[in-house]
Amino acid sequence: MKIAIVGAGKLGIKITEALLGGDHSVTIIDKNEALLQKLSSQMDLMTVTGNAKQISLLENIGINTYDYLISSTNSDEKNIVICSFAKRLGCKKVIARVRDPEHMNQIDFVKDLMGIDYIVNPDLAITLEIYKFLVEKYTLSNGIFTSGKISLIEFSTDRMPEIVGRTVYFVNESLGNMHVVSISRNGKVIIPKRNTVIMKDDSLYVVGEKNPITRLNNQVHEKGKYTNLQKVMILGGGKTGLYLAQKLSEFGISVKLIEKDKARCQYLSNHLDDVLVLNGDATDMDLLQEENIDEMDAVVTATGFDEENLLLALMAKQHGIEDVIAKVSRESYATLIESMGIDMALNPLDMTASNILRFIQGSKRVLSSQLIQGQAEMIEIIADDHMRITNRPIEHIGLPDDVIIAAIHRGNDVIIPNGDTEILKNDKVIIICLLSEIPDLEKFIRSGRTGFFK
């Protein structure tokens, strides 16, 4: 497919890397000529220097021959206008990044009026994952995700203490026709190896056939365990803080939101009902003590600075808060996050890129997609002969470290694969992958002859 990307920022580059891995033809448009020259020397793509709001530029590149245009500049209004122009000029589908809550309140009208096919919002994507982590857990979600005959279950090792200290290989053997496909440890999701040791307080994600998973669920999920989410403190009143406070408040949870910018506090107070908005510095421990941080069921750190979010999350954990969630954009902090013991860390860049890629891929080969704690993705694809994952033992495919073949649905059979298993044409394959590895994964699941989704 031919795809145009407007904006060579972090999101634009992330999507470009993934699309090139999938054998698509990519054109990237930006005003920064030096940056585009650097990209063209590193990647096999076409670059165009200029302002994509100019109709002449879109016409010159032949936008009517493109399958998709993705506008990811730092301006919502610019993204909306560029997408609208491209659609009117004949581009088949257009995608815009839009973050402003004022736009999101009327998003359906904007999409219909401007002809935009898909809108992504990094802050809203993070909000939904935090909401699911907190609210669905506390409303007794049974932890099962099912696709056909294959199911995924999540549970804490405190429900099966006999496996603590054991290797993943041992646990898989004892589980039978199920296996551990990912582990959430101290706020970080990891893809385990055979010799990975299960630790106390790990959360395990296990894939298997639906009926055995259901029986395991009855064993490891304690009905009524989570019923008491009442108080949440949000540190940082940016877009993520606003969206999350709104959703939690609507659910009936008592929310305190701390923001140090006075004008922003006024805006938040005007747009949030039943939320206590406090003007203050969230790093001020005296303030947090005065606002009874020790009594909170959960704390979410969502300031505009990764370092501050990590510091605040660590501080909240030291105060014994059960659930501490941090918004962290830099992948280089992944190792640090794991050592801090926070419960969940979310990267808006990875999540947004994943959402865009799944929309582009549609239903032609990707049958379903499910995020795991906002850090990893479970996708179900249909295999064909021209993918690098087919017709040879899995152990010889050379998959990236943070990618695992979780299960195979072949006809009426469910196969929990090992290193000798081969994936065949028309198999439905469930893959678990860290979001940071999506560009590399695309190289393995593309069709070598015609492009993955042609």
Image (cartoon, grey):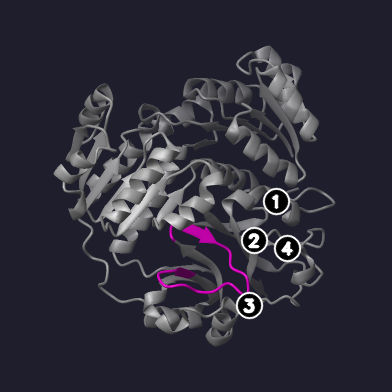
Q: Secondary structure at mark 1?
A: helix
Q: Is residue 285 visible?
A: yes
Q: Are marks 2 and 1 in contact (CB under 8 Å)?
A: yes
Question: Which quarter of the image is occupied by the N terminus?
Answer: top right
Would you say the magenta stretch is mainly helix, strand or loop? loop
Q: Position of residue 6 (x, y in %)?
A: 63, 26
Give the Cα separation between the discs numbered 4 and 1.
17 Å
Q: Secondary structure at mark 4?
A: loop
Q: Earlier in the sequence, mark 2 or mark 1?
A: 2
Amino acid type, residue under disc 3 in the picture: Ile
Q: Position of residue 39 (x, y in %)?
A: 73, 30
Q: Are marks 2 and 4 in contact (CB under 8 Å)?
A: no
Alpha-carbon neighbours of circle 4 within 10 Å: few (<14), some, or many (≥20)? Answer: many
Q: Nearer the viewer, residue 331 or 276?
A: 331
Q: Which residue is mark 2?
A: 403
Q: Which residue is mark 4?
A: 383
Q: Earlier in the sequence, mark 1 or mark 3?
A: 3
Q: Position of residue 359 (x, y in %)?
A: 58, 45
Q: Earlier in the sequence, mark 2 or mark 3?
A: 2
Give the quarter of the image for residue 394: bottom right
* Residue drawn at 21 percent across, 45 percent down: 255
Give the Cα separation between the discs numbered 2 and 3.
15 Å
Q: Earlier in the sequence, mark 2 or mark 4?
A: 4
Alpha-carbon neighbours of circle 3 within 10 Å: few (<14), some, or many (≥20)? Answer: some
Amino acid type, residue under disc 2 in the picture: Val
Q: Which mark is residue 416?
A: 3
The answer to whether 156 appears left or right of 27 in the picture is left
Q: Earlier in the sequence, mark 4 or mark 1?
A: 4
Q: Which residues are magenta?
A: 186-204
Amino acid type, residue under disc 4 in the picture: Ala
